[in-house]
Image: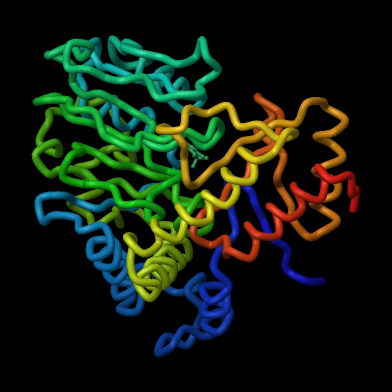
């Protein structure tokens, strides 16, 4: 069977070169005599792997020295809770901008621990735009302001960051990290589940300004959720997700070979532009997102009827393009076009859309 173009939102298509490198190392990692899945996380080989993965991310994202990089389990979803429990005292005010389903879930977790307030929301317009956050909206005593940088389900993105003054900005960049330039210095915390754009499932990367590690943490907070404990132990308080850390390193090295994040962003914008242009020129396909808030990583689009949507998805699948169905909560279609999706995949999809509109059904 041939490899298809996989438009899944995550886990998602990885660069072929990365998979080939992993295949080459699979049975016997150079110098280790065993695979990464079998080696001790305390071995010299793994020490080197985790060090290289962190160093690669630091180079790529230009992460300053006063930020720690943590590898944690539980996905981006556990960070919804960890952020609150590490940065805020119980009952303290925290602020959230609601721009989609994941932002809503982050708020729900925030509410378990803090006085979490939604300071703005685009829910009434089915999350089709990013509401502006002005300083007046932010509670000056909030422990942090949480945003979802790129909204995976609705295809919107903070293309400019809000000014939060002295309140630390916490951002979930799961679906855009390494795909577009993100100014780390503007954030208190960036976190991201790696399965969207950085590797296979199984962990989240947390980039945290070191002064935030000094905030007092309630004794009830579990060890595995404590940022300072993770930082003090080099993300190896317990057995880390070794293979995912290794794969994330390979993806990072691949991005470096492509010219880094700036080059990647340019390519992703070009890829996204091909699809947005196709949609704009179409009478059949429609994208509801405000132009200035468009994501270059996830593009949503609809057809007039359920039957046409089904027929289009079937035709695309017949041409080797899978997982174009929109999120189960919103329907329609969605193309997730992360770093691993080559331009050929986008061109094939655009052609399929044009052919469908012209009456072809396969
Ligand atoms: C996928 C996703 C999540 C959830 O990630 P998990 O790793 O499955 O917990 C959270 N936020 C955003 C923006 C996502 O795209």
Q: What colour scheme has been applied to the protein in the rendered image?
A: rainbow
Residue 327 versus residue 221: which sits nearer the camera? 327
The percent position of residue 113, horizontal first and vertical second, equals 32, 16
**Residue 77 at least partly seen:** no
- The quarter of the rendered structure image containing the N terminus is bottom right
Q: Residue at x 51, y 23 (%)?
A: 128
Q: Residue at x 41, y 35 (%)?
A: 157
Left or right of 47 in this view: 157: right
**Residue 111 at least partly seen:** yes
Residue 70, relative to residue 74: is it above or below? below
Residue 30 versus residue 229: which sits nearer the camera? 30
When asked about the image quadrant of residue 241, the answer is bottom left
Residue 4, relative to residue 157: is it above or below? below
When asked about the image quadrant of residue 140, the answer is top left
Residue 167, relative to residue 204: is it above or below? above
The percent position of residue 126, horizontal first and vertical second, equals 55, 18
The percent position of residue 54, horizontal first and vertical second, equals 28, 63
Left or right of 100 in this view: 281: right
The mark total stands at 0
Left or right of 348 in this view: 178: left
When asked about the image quadrant of residue 88, the answer is top left
Q: Residue at x 33, y 75 (%)?
A: 43
Residue 55 versus residue 125: which sits nearer the camera? 125
Q: Residue at x 39, y 56 (%)?
A: 265
The percent position of residue 33, horizontal first and vertical second, equals 47, 88
């Amino acid at each position: 069977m041939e490899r298809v173009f996989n438009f899944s939102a995550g886990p998602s298509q990885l660069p072929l070169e990365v998979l080939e490198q992993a295949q080459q190392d699979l049975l016997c990692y150079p110098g280790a005599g065993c695979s990464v899945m079998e080696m001790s996380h305390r071995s010299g080989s793994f020490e080197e792997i985790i060090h290289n993965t962190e160093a690669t991310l630091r180079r790529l994202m230009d992460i300053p020295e006063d930020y720690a990089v943590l590898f944690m389990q539980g996905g981006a979803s556990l960070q919804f809770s960890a952020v609150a429990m590490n940065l805020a005292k119980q009952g303290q005010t925290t602020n959230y901008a609601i721009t989609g389903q994941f932002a809503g879930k982050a708020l729900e977790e925030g509410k378990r621990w803090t006085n979490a307030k939604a300071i703005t929301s685009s829910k009434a317009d089915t999350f089709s735009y990013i509401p502006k956050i002005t300083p007046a909206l932010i509670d000056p005593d909030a422990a942090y302001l949480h945003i979802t940088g790129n909204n995976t389900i609705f295809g919107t993105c903070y293309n400019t960051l809000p000014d939060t003054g002295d309140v630390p900005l916490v951002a979930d960049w799961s679906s855009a990290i390494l795909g577009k330039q993100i100014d780390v210095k503007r954030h208190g915390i960036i976190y991201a589940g790696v399965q969207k754009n950085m590797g296979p499932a199984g962990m989240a990367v947390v980039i945290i300004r070191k002064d935030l590690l000094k905030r007092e943490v309630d004794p009830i907070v579990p060890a595995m959720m404590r940022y300072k404990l993770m930082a003090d132990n080099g993300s190896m308080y317990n057995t880390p997700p070794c293979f995912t850390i290794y794969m994330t390193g390979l993806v990072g090295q691949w991005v470096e070979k492509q010219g880094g994040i700036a080059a990647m962003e340019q390519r992703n914008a070009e890829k996204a532009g091909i699809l947005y242009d196709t949609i704009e020129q179409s009478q059949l396909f429609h994208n509801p997102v405000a132009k200035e808030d468009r994501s270059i990583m996830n593009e949503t689009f609809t057809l007039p009827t359920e039957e046409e949507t089904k027929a289009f998805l079937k035709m695309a699948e017949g041409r080797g393009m899978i997982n174009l169905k929109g999120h189960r909560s919103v329907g329609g279609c969605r193309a997730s076009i992360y770093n691993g999706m080559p331009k050929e995949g986008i061109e094939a999809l655009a052609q399929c859309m044009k052919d469908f509109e012209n009456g072809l059904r396969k």
